Image (cartoon, rainbow, N blue to C red):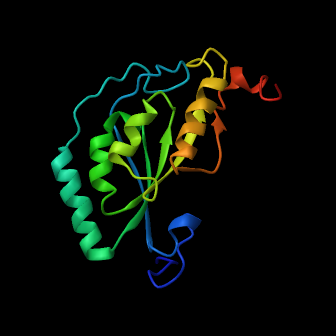
Amino acid sequence: MMSWTPEEFNAGVTWQWRDKCRYYATWAFAKACRANCFYCFLRGHKGESRPWTDEQAVVAWRNTYEQLGPCSLLLAGMEPTLELPLLGEVLKYHYGNLQTNMMFDVEELPKHCPPDRVDLHPTFHPHVWNMDIEPVLEKLRWLKAEGYHIELLASVGAPPYLRFWDE
């Protein structure tokens, strides 16, 4: 038996969307990533096809919106920012928390996903940035100036990196 009903507060919905969303979903849809992380089980995975098209996904999320209202979505997968046009279409109906490795062109994000529809959950991948966090912080400063909410910056917890956390 389900212990939560739609009339109750849903703990999965993050605080910024609680007045708008009753439902929460994780959508791991991204099909590619450029980081090629040595610790990732999807290393080298380069965009294999999905069992649905982008158009089918947008219709499904629009139908969900029409039936249930806007949802709070954790947007994940390999690297969701490689699919900004799809994200933008889905976020016309829903709100999102976007996980990203920050390898994307940040100036493209506002063209598809407005700051009032998405929060960023960036992760610092040390090998991608040659152990230098400053380029990531620079991108985050730009996004904050554009109105994006970034509550935290996580670091990859791969065992070889743990010894550097105090630096």
Residue 22 point in image, percent of width and height: 44, 74
Nearest the eye: 65 or 161? 65
98, above or below 30, in the image = below
Above or below, 144 relative to 26 = above
Q: Residue at x 16, y 49 (%)?
A: 55
Task: Say whether residue 8 is left or right of residue 161.
Answer: left
Q: Is residue 132 left or right of residue 10?
A: right
Residue 82 at x, y percent in the picture = 35, 33
Determine the residue located farthest toward the top in the rendered image. 130
In percent of the image, x 18 and y 58: which residue is there?
Answer: 59
Left/right placement of residue 51 relative to residue 15 reads: left
> Looking at the image, which residue sits at the far right?
166
Q: Position of residue 119 (x, y in %)?
A: 51, 52
Rendered location of residue 165, percent (x, y): 78, 29
Residue 92 seen in the figure:
yes
Q: Quadrant of residue 81?
A: top left
Whether residue 84 sits left or right of residue 5 in the image: it is: left
Is residue 82 depicted above or below 117 in this figure? above
Q: Quadrant of the C terminus?
A: top right
